[in-house]
């Protein structure tokens, strides 16, 4: 028996366009953008509402209630454009526990340094900040501490973020 017949052909790895795009994105993205990509859906929805509010008013500071109203508008618009796929998003946003989860997402984003919370949101009482957010407190001010362009750049290729309207200018 010859040794050549028992050898299997060696396949070399191939470089595809997708591999090149991924390498470019990893090389050009900052640690901030990488951490933004790893956020849960509630935080992405909250950031999309905040960015939409900033784009609408031109003011970088908004009330929590205005941001939550903006997220509801985003879900209505997403349903009008994409239909049934975004009906799940609207149900996700409008359920009472998810509205509270967005308040907790705001606190989580504050802890990471992405947002600044002021007013009644920033006051910790004996029950903790989460209790204050769960009581329907919509008047606290929320301000983005990073550039909106960083958020858009981080979510440029994110499917969930595109559904929310982040990552490209409308």
Image: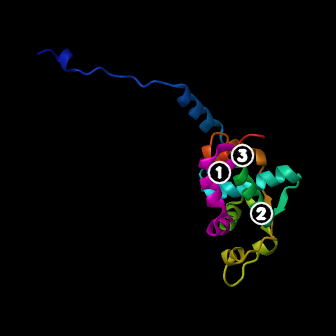
Across and down, in percent, residue 32 comes to 67, 49
The magenta-colored residue range is 79-102
Under circle 3, the secondary element is loop
Under circle 1, the secondary element is helix
Q: Earlier in the sequence, mark 1 or mark 3?
A: 1
Residue at horizontal 66 percent and vertical 67 percent from the top: 104
Q: Which residue is mark 1?
A: 36
Q: Nearer the viewer, mark 1 or mark 3?
A: 3
Residue at horizontal 80 percent and vertical 70 percent from the top: 140
Q: Which of the 4 image quadrants contains residue 62?
A: bottom right
Q: Which residue is mark 3?
A: 165
Residue at horizontal 66 percent and vertical 46 percent from the top: 163
Residue 137 to residue 151: above or below: below
Q: Residues within 10 Å of mark 2 (few under 14, many from 20)?
A: many
**Viewed as shown, does residue 40 lie left or right of 2?**
right
Q: CA distance from mark 1 to mark 3?
A: 15 Å
Residue at horizontal 55 percent and vertical 26 percent from the top: 17
């Amino acid at each position: 028996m010859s040794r050549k017949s028992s050898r299997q052909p060696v396949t070399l790895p191939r470089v595809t366009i997708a591999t090149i795009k991924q390498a470019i994105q990893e090389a050009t993205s900052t640690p901030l953008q990488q951490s933004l990509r790893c956020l849960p859906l509630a935080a992405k929805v909250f950031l999309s509402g905040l960015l939409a509010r900033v784009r609408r008013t031109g003011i970088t500071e908004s009330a929590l209630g205005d941001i939550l109203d903006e997220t509801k508008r985003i879900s209505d618009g997403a349903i009008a454009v994409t239909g049934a796929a975004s009906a799940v998003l609207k149900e996700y946003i409008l359920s009472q526990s998810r509205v509270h989860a967005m308040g907790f997402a705001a606190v989580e984003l504050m802890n990471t340094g992405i947002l600044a919370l002021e007013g009644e949101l920033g006051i910790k009482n004996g029950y903790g900040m989460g209790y204050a957010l769960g009581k329907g407190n919509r008047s606290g001010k929320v301000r983005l501490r990073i550039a909106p362009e960083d958020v858009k750049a981080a979510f440029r290729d994110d499917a969930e973020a595109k559904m929310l309207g982040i990552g490209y200018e409308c």
